[in-house]
Amino acid sequence: MRIAFLGTPDFAVAALAALVEAGHEIACVYSQPPAPRGRGQELKPSPVHAYAEARGIPVRTPVSMRDPADIEAFEALNLEAGVVVAFGQILPAAVLDAPRLGCFNLHASLLPRWRGAAPIQRAIMAGDKVTGAEVMQMTEGLDEGPVLASETLRIDALETAGSLHDRLAVAGAALLARTMAAVERGVAVARPQPAEGETYAKKIRPKEARLRWTKPAVEVDRKIRGLSPFPGAWFELPTERGPVRVKALLSSLEDAEGAPGAVLDDALLVACGEGAVRLLRVQREGKGPQDAATFLRGRPVAVGTVLG
């Protein structure tokens, strides 16, 4: 089919690659405009933009798909379908209706649970045991369209947003390729989303990343894993020169008690409001990620230290 692909982050690259490998004609790729990245804050293209450009696929980076000129240019592509994967913009009806068969979206949750911007992080932070990827026919409502296909994945006890992201990207790309093949053959069947179970995955705000040791350990553990590797849940480690910010990137639950924030052994077991978490992977401000044992070799944390 003749398709336009609209996507921006790493998660969407696997989906675009799957469509290319399936033999679809990618008439154009749409992505968010280049943004400052890295230490030098140089303007760099998004991962999807870079992938498409390297393969000679035309790329457009409109600031808003609601601009009449951009809508007209999209309509002029004479598409059979549009495919949207984490594009980062709400599309108007004129764009959704332009392709002959409409627009389709790959979303990283089992709808209607976790509609919105951060479904992977929110699923882990909420303690969900399963999640998945789904392909839906797009409507004007936010992630409200009928579902054509689903793939379910378990969320493991040591799952992070990073590891789940990677697994969902692979599973979702394969699901999308199968679904678009069914759409092309005219055999895809769309079913309405369930009327109950709707939740919204709000964008992660910076203030959410601060760890609160007074919370139950199960909540602390979920936040650590749900915000790893980015933006990274953080705490303050007291030092002779003042507190140092440290990100907690991986943790596990343990049966222990103590004052919230108190370090209970020499291997970063930390007491919470109820129970305790063992920090397995951390990242000191300005340094790279390290497993706890490596981190402690360079900076031992004494039993009784109270983390902020």
Image: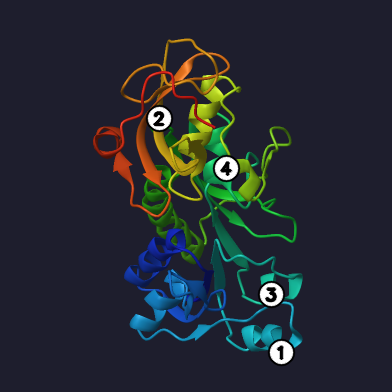
Q: What residue type is labelled 4?
A: Ala
Measure the alpha-carbon separation of dots 3 and 4. Answer: 36 Å
Spot occupied by residue 269 in the image (x, y as percentages of width and height): 39, 21
* Residue sitting nearer the eye, 20 or 44: 44
Whether residue 285 sits left or right of residue 70 in the image: it is: left
Q: Which residue is painted at 46% across and 86% down in the image?
A: 58
Between discs 2 and 3, the one toward the N terminus: 3
**Mark 3 or mark 1, which is nearer to you?**
1
Disc 2 marks a residue whose amino acid type is Ser
The residue lying at 57 percent from left, 45 percent from top is: 119
Q: Name the residue under label 2.
A: 251
Spatial distance from mark 2 to mark 3, Cα to Cα? 44 Å
Amino acid beneath label 3: Val
Q: Name the residue under label 3.
A: 95
Q: Which of 130 and 189 is in front in this view?
A: 130
Give percent across and percent down for residue 102: 63, 68
Name the side, left or right, on which 287 lies relative to 261: left
Q: Is residue 154 left or right of residue 74?
A: left
- The quarter of the displayed image where residue 308 is located: top right
User: Could you tell me which secondary element the residue under label 1 belongs to?
Assistant: helix
**Element type at marker 3?**
helix
SS category of the residue bearing label 2: strand
> Could you classify mark 1 by the number of other residues whose Cα lies within 10 Å: few (under 14), some (14-19), or many (20 or more)?
few
**C-alpha span from label 1 to label 4:** 40 Å
* Residue 131 seen in the current view: no
Q: Is residue 9 above or below residue 95?
A: above
Residue 69: give its label.
1
Residue type at mark 1? Ala
Disc 3/disc 1 C-alpha distance (Å): 12 Å
The numbered disc on residue 209 is 4
Chain-order first, disc 4 or disc 2: 4
